[in-house]
Amino acid sequence: MSRRQPYRSRSTRTRRPVLLIIVILAGALVAGVGYFSPGSSGVPSGPQPTAKPAEGTPLGDPPGDPVAVPAAGLASVEALALVAALPDAVYADNGSYAGNRQELFGDAWAFDFDQNGCDTRNDILTRDLTGTDIDPATCRVYTGILTDPYTGETIDFVRGQETSADVQIDHLLPLKAVYATGGEAWPAEKREALANDPVNLLAVKGTENSSKSDSLPSEWLPGFYPDVSDRHDLGQRVVWDDLPADTGLQCWYIDKLVPVFVAYDLGVTPEDRAAMTAVLESCLD
């Protein structure tokens, strides 16, 4: 499959109203420092997530300073304004992340974000699965049913050495990507908070989580996989202009992702800004 071509500019008739909306909303949103009013993210016309909204709020910098973020995502028009206002970032992988995940982001799922006595993985399984069998003494989820938000598939989850990986916890903002676009300079407590923040986590089909890996929106969207190889390893970033006609799932995904960028004050590369903008503009059509 050939490499995707860069985005083509939309017509003036389409862009002028969008730009006007961005200017108006960006001004209103900047006025409320650190707070974003939840909007209706719409119902994706593709597979629909069944996760219940998280009730916690992510930690700011320094930890302990709450930042209100709508767990269910923003309306696309709000997200579009926020994407335009995100600071610029450069993806710089100097190799210091490899093999150091625990040192940089803490023990996997050990940070009790909502201080309810349960580890993060079981908190997310409890939130996102239905029909769960849970041991209240340990918080462990032994069985449950996941409707995968990325594919719409129904997965019967069974805890066990051979089956637990069928359902994995996806970081909407992948940790390696966060580290390479500004997170390296964060205090360890802030990195640990993001790694365990329910707003940045989804229970998903294991193979979908593996497919996404450390990808940002210019490399991966649910239901759409661009032709990429050796992505960050060779410094290659890919954008595309041939999104499928039904972009409801992608709209939902970006609407949910943008507030995490904003809450943690993470910059965005030109390629990712272009990818998110293209998706969000399609949501307004």
Image (cartoon, rainbow, N blue to C red):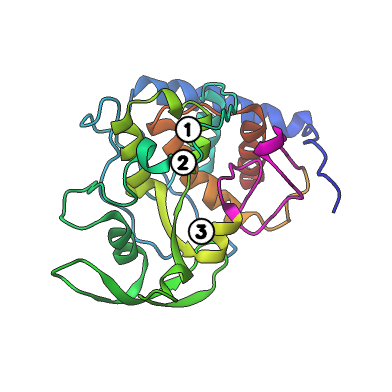
Q: Which residue is mark 3?
A: 43
Label 3: element kind: loop
Question: What is the distance, in whole Å, between disc 1 and disc 3 at their CAs?
Answer: 32 Å
Q: Which residue is mark 2?
A: 175
At label 2, the amino acid type is Leu
Q: Magenta stretch?
A: 212-240
Closer to viewer: mark 1 or mark 3 = 1
**Residue 265 relative to residue 10: left or right:** left
Q: Quadrant of residue 165?
A: bottom left
Q: Residue 283: image x %, image y %?
A: 61, 47
Label 1: element kind: helix
Label 2: element kind: helix
Query: For mark 1, does the 10 Å Cα neighbourhood hold few (<14), some (14 to 19), or many (20 or more) residues?
Result: many
Seen at 28% across and 59% down, the residue is 123
Of labels 3 and 2, earlier in sequence is 3
Q: Is residue 38 visible?
A: no
Q: Which residue is mark 1?
A: 179
Question: What is the distance, in whole Å, between disc 1 and disc 2 at their CAs?
Answer: 6 Å
Closer to viewer: mark 3 or mark 2 = 2
